[in-house]
Amino acid sequence: MGFDLYFAGNSYNEVMEYAKEKKVCKLFTQMGERKAINNWCDEKREGKINNKIFVDSGAYTAHTQGKEVNVDEYISYVNGIDSEIDLLAQVDKIPGRFGVLRTKEELLAAPKESWNNYLYMRDKVKSVEKLVPIFHQDEDFRWLKNMLEYKDENGNHIPYIGISSSKDKAPKYREAWYWKVFATIQASSNPNVKTHSFGTSSIRHLELFPFTSSDATSWVRGAAFGSITTDFGTILVSGIQDKDKRHINACPISYKALEEYVNKYGFNLKELIYDSEESKAHIKRQCFNIAYLQNWADNYEYKGPKSFIRKGLF
């Protein structure tokens, strides 16, 4: 049984070609990544690749820039590539102004505006089943219940919803919120709804809760900071930081074990540590992280409560 892990963020052509070969799911934001989206969609249309593609509205990116996403223009864009994309995020409302303390009124108004945007988009997108509404941490749970109980004119529930935790909260608070989210889903009339966790790279959380999919940029960010992701956690390997006491070079026994470990994925540990004439170490680390995380996704095992297991999924 697999898990749809969407790799977010862009990188070098060499890395993106490797991602295509590994059949990864790819999330793009339409704010700033349309060229890459179009390239992947062209290749998918031509039968060169068959990777799943998730288009995000870029609402948060726009929020950080003091802008708003043009909903109609976004709809027009995704309708033009409808046959090639698998999921698209609604335009959700981020409360307040970036960097400014949000008021109670702004926090209360945002989920209503998000829901109205979702309903507006339902009437205009080509494939409504691909449209993902988003429930955010700190929003009243009545909005999650609203999504779960909604039915269209044919009596069909929303098939896929987005769950977005607050990344500025400690993991224990996000985890406590996830418990409440899935308890609410289980108690609803739509317990088998598919769920996408936005911006979640915590393997613990992804195995503890029955998400259908998630997206994260940790594969590229970790590599940039000199680390690789493994079964043993995140390990610092960059040669630039080889004097750091946390570096793998500080423990010869661990170095040997890690060398054998990365070999199983088709990589040489030295190429993840040092640049060479043939390759750059940070690029190789990105590719290794893709290989590791895709292998995890392909062999995903749910380890959470049996009461959360959805019919027909596990």
Image (tube, rainbow, N blue to C red):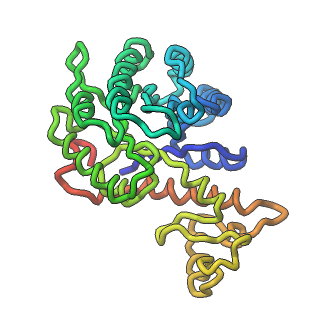
Residue 13, by quadrant, is top right
Against 134, residue 219 (above or below) is: below
- Which sits in the foreground, 66 or 49? 66
**Residue sitting at x 57%, y 58%:** 289
Please tell me which residue is depicted at 68% across the width and 67% down the height of the picture: 272
Q: Is residue 282 visible?
A: yes
* Relative horizontal placement of residue 300, taking residue 157 as reference (left or right): right
Outermost residue toward the right in this view: 277
Image coordinates for residue 204, horizontal then vertical, percent: 37, 60
Q: Position of residue 189 (x, y in %)?
A: 16, 32
How many circles with numbers are drawn on the protein?
Answer: 0
Question: Is residue 180 placed above or below 276 in the rendered structure?
Answer: above
Left or right side of 114 for 140: left
Q: Is residue 306 left or right of residue 107?
A: left
Q: Quadrant of residue 131?
A: top left
Vertical position of residue 300 compared to residue 41: above or below: below
Query: Which residue does the image show at 51% across and 42% down from the upper left?
Result: 25
Res. 107 image quadrant: top left
Residue 182 screen position, x and y as percent: 24, 45
Q: Residue at x 43, y 28 (%)?
A: 93
Q: Position of residue 136 (x, y in %)?
A: 36, 38
Please determine whether, in this image, residue 207 is positioned above or below residue 62. Answer: below
Q: In this rendering, does residue 161 appear at all?
A: no
Towards the viewer: 120 or 10: 120
